Image: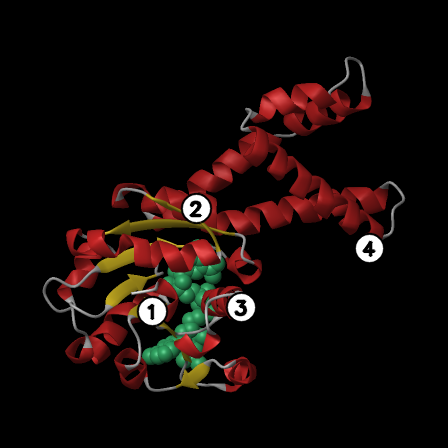
Amino acid sequence: MNLKNKRVCIIGCGNLGKSILNGLVDDKDYPSENIIATKRSLDAIKLYEEKGVRITTDNVWAVGESDVIIVAVKPYKVISVLNDIKAHLKPEKHIVVSLATNVHVNELEESLPDNMPVFRAMPNTAADVKESMTSLCHNEAGTPELATVQYFFDKIGTSITINEELMDAATVLGSCGTAFVLRFIRAMVQGGIQIGLDSKTATEIVNQTVKGAANLLIERKNHPEFEIDKVTTPKGCTILGLNEMEHNGLSSSLIKGIVTSYDKIS
Ligand SMILES: NC(=O)C1=CN([C@@H]2O[C@H](COP(=O)(O)OP(=O)(O)OC[C@H]3O[C@@H](n4cnc5c(N)ncnc54)[C@H](OP(=O)(O)O)[C@@H]3O)[C@@H](O)[C@H]2O)C=CC1
Ligand SMILES: O=C(O)[C@@H]1CCC=N1
């Protein structure tokens, strides 16, 4: 089957679900008519009907109309949602993808029919602009369905497939990481304002500088320090600022924050 004919429902279309929805509805070749979004209160997603997306409060109906079931509710709600739809899931037809942190594949399988293809996906909200980093893992029944799941998450960014043992770490870096990077960006803008730039100009400069630095690493595949060495002119202003940041714990605070988030999940 042509993968663009695969129908997807996003159960629990909130912060992350809407980011994924935005990434999919703007896709040039995936038909929005193949997307269903569910929530108990539909006001926040009504606007998507104009783009051909079907919206509903009925998860069971949504499952019956879909092939890929993305469960985007909060972790503590996942099992109850699966219990509601379990009787309507067909292992030969459906693929279940949970976005929830810390709800493991074996827990998901316990609330699903036998031999159900089950995935965990850890995207981030940059899915909104098709720039998500998504980490995937799956059960054995999911193996033949990996290409289908990759199809959707590669439409909203980039995906990698890893062992489930690494999903907590991938969540912290790739999902929480969006907030970490945005806070870093905000701090740079605050510094820019302190040295005389208005907020809009500082933001424009910082946003492109961060995008450029990331693309340098993505395109050239060099270590960050290799690229930093090109900027830090001996006795220049960059190395002074960089060392002052390190004297005040820049790298250490980032590492400690990442470990703290990881400890919370695991
Ligand atoms: N936010 C992020 O960046 C990331 C989040 N995640 C994971 O994604 C999941 C969602 O997170 P997030 O989007 O932030 O949470 P939100 O609370 O924003 O979204 C969850 C949505 O689920 C809906 N919902 C609740 N119960 C039901 C139900 N029974 N049927 C249908 N919809 C329901 C709620 O809407 P209503 O009340 O109208 O039903 C709500 O909008 C979590 O498990 C989280 O761990 C993973 C990676 C990144
Ligand atoms: O903060 C959270 O728990 C969710 C999971 C990763 C990003 N947001």
Q: Look at the numbered disc 1 and give the secondary structure of its residue.
A: loop
Quarter of the image for residue 61 reads: bottom left
Could you give the CA–CA distance between mark 3 and mark 4, rounded to whole angstroms? 25 Å
Could you give the CA–CA distance between mark 1 and mark 4, rounded to whole angstroms? 42 Å
Count neighbours of disc 1 (C-alpha within 10 A) and say few if under 14, some if 14 to 19, many if 20 or more: some
Looking at the image, is 60 positioned above or below residue 182? below
What residue sits right under mark 1 in the picture? 6
Is residue 229 found left or right of 14 in the rendered image?
A: right
Respond yes or no on whether mark 2 lies under 8 Å from ligand 2: yes
Q: Looking at the image, which residue sits at the far front?
A: 2
Q: Nearer the viewer, mark 2 or mark 3?
A: 3
First in residue order: circle 3 vs circle 1: 1
Is residue 57 found left or right of 180 in the rendered image?
A: left
Please give the label number shown on residue 172.
2
Q: Is residue 123 visible?
A: no
- Ligand 1: image quarter: bottom left
What residue sits right under mark 4 in the picture? 200
First in residue order: circle 2 vs circle 4: 2
Q: Amino acid at mark 3?
A: Asn
Q: Nearer the viewer, mark 3 or mark 1?
A: 1
Could you give the CA–CA distance between mark 2 and mark 4, rounded to whole angstroms? 30 Å
- In front: 187, or 7? 7
What residue sits right under mark 3 in the picture? 22
Could you give the CA–CA distance between mark 3 and mark 1, rounded to whole angstroms? 18 Å
Measured as percent of width and height from the top left, residue 102 is found at 30, 55
Q: Amino acid at mark 4?
A: Lys
